[in-house]
Image (tube, rainbow, N blue to C red):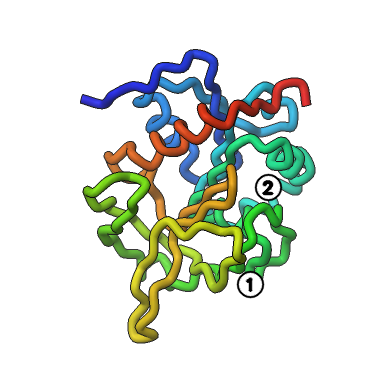
C-alpha cells in the first residue's frame, strides 16, 4: 500500500508539452499530491514545484519556444521553488548541452551530452544505490539518456552508473539546491520513492510561485 503524503496546499506542476507527463502526474497522485498540467505562463502561478518530463529534447525545446515558456519557466526556477527534470528535462535544466540548437535554462551547473547512452534500441535498466532513497536499490530505466559530462562544485551527485569500457562512474542523478535532475525515468517504474523525495523537497522549501 502506498503511503500518501498529506499536504493539501501542495500543488506540483508538470510541463505538459510532450513526453511522459501523464506518468509523472500518476505518481504524484499516488502520493496524494495535487497536480496541474503546465502549457502556459499562467499555469505556473501558485505552484509549489515543477517537473520537466522526458521526451525528445529538440522537440521539447521547440515547443517551449512556440508556447513562449522559456522566460516564464526560467523565472519560476529563479523563485527558488523546487524543479525536477527527467531525461530531456535534465537537458533543459543544464548549464550546457551538446549539439542542442536551443538554449537551456542554465539552472544546474552541469554539462550534458545528449543521447550519449545511444539510440532507443540501446535503452537499458539497472539498479542504482541512492542514499537519499534508503538502502533498497532503485531500479532505473534509461531511454536515449543524456550523460552528465561534468558537474560544478555546488552540485551534489546523488547516483552514478559505471561506464564501460571507460571504466568510470558517470552521474545520472544530481541536485543543486532546489533543482534536481535524473538521466533516467522514475515515472516509468512502480517505485514512488523518487517522487516522494521530490515532494518532501517541495514541502520543506516553503516557496511558492504564488503571485510572482
Is 159 displayed left or right of 42 in the figure? left
Q: In this rendering, would 61 be left or right of 28?
A: right
Q: Kindly identify which numbered label has been placed on residue 185.
A: none
Q: Nearer the viewer, residue 147 or 130?
A: 130
Q: Position of residue 47 (x, y in %)?
A: 63, 26
Taking 131 as reference, is 169 above or below it?
A: below
Residue depicted at x 59% and y 47%: 177
Counting other residues with Cα less than 10 Å from the Cα at mark 1, is it few (<14), some (14-19), or many (20 or more)? some
Q: Nearer the viewer, residue 56 or 172?
A: 172
User: Which residue of the protein is positioned furthest toward the bottom in this rendering?
Assistant: 165
Q: Residue at x 69, y 41 (%)?
A: 77
Locate the C terminus and report the quarter of the image it occupies: top right
Residue at coordinates 31% horizontally, 64% vertically from top-left? 124
Between residues 102 and 77, which one lies in front from this camera angle? 77
* Rendered residue at 50%/56% (across/down): 174
- Residue 98 is marked as 1
Q: Quadrant of residue 3?
A: top left
Most foreground residue, 102 or 165: 165
Residue 94 in view, yes or no: yes
**Left or right: 41 in relation to 154:** right
Lower position in the chain sequence, tag 1 or tag 2: 2
The percent position of residue 127, horizontal first and vertical second, equals 26, 58
Residue 167 higher or lower than 42, as above or below:
below
* Between marks 1 and 2 in the image, the one whose residue lies nearer the viewer: 1
Number of marks drawn: 2
Q: According to the image, label 2 marks what residue?
A: 63
Graded by Cα atoms within 10 Å as few (under 14), some (14 to 19) or many (20 or more), the crowding at tag 2 reads some
Amino acid at each position: 500500500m502506498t503511503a500518501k503524503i498529506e499536504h493539501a496546499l501542495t500543488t506540483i506542476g508538470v510541463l505538459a508539452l510532450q513526453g511522459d507527463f501523464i506518468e509523472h502526474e500518476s505518481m504524484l497522485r499516488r502520493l496524494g499530491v495535487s497536480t496541474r498540467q503546465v502549457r502556459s505562463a499562467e499555469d505556473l502561478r501558485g505552484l509549489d514545484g515543477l517537473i520537466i518530463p522526458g521526451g525528445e529534447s529538440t522537440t521539447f525545446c521547440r515547443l517551449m519556444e512556440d508556447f513562449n515558456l522559456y522566460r516564464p519557466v526560467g523565472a519560476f526556477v529563479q523563485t527558488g521553488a523546487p524543479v525536477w527534470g527527467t531525461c530531456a528535462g535534465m537537458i533543459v535544466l543544464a548549464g550546457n548541452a551538446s549539439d542542442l540548437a536551443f538554449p537551456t535554462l542554465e539552472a544546474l551547473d552541469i554539462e550534458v551530452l545528449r543521447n550519449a547512452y545511444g539510440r532507443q534500441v540501446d535503452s537499458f535498466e539497472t539498479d542504482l544505490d541512492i542514499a537519499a532513497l534508503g538502502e533498497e536499490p532503485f531500479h532505473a530505466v534509461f531511454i536515449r539518456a543524456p550523460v552528465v559530462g561534468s558537474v560544478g562544485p555546488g552540485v551534489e551527485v546523488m547516483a552514478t552508473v559505471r561506464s564501460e569500457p571507460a571504466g568510470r562512474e558517470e552521474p545520472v542523478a544530481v541536485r543543486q539546491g532546489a533543482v534536481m535532475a535524473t538521466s533516467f525515468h522514475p515515472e516509468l517504474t512502480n517505485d514512488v520513492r523518487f517522487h516522494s523525495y521530490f515532494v518532501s523537497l517541495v514541502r520543506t522549501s516553503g516557496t511558492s510561485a504564488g503571485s510572482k
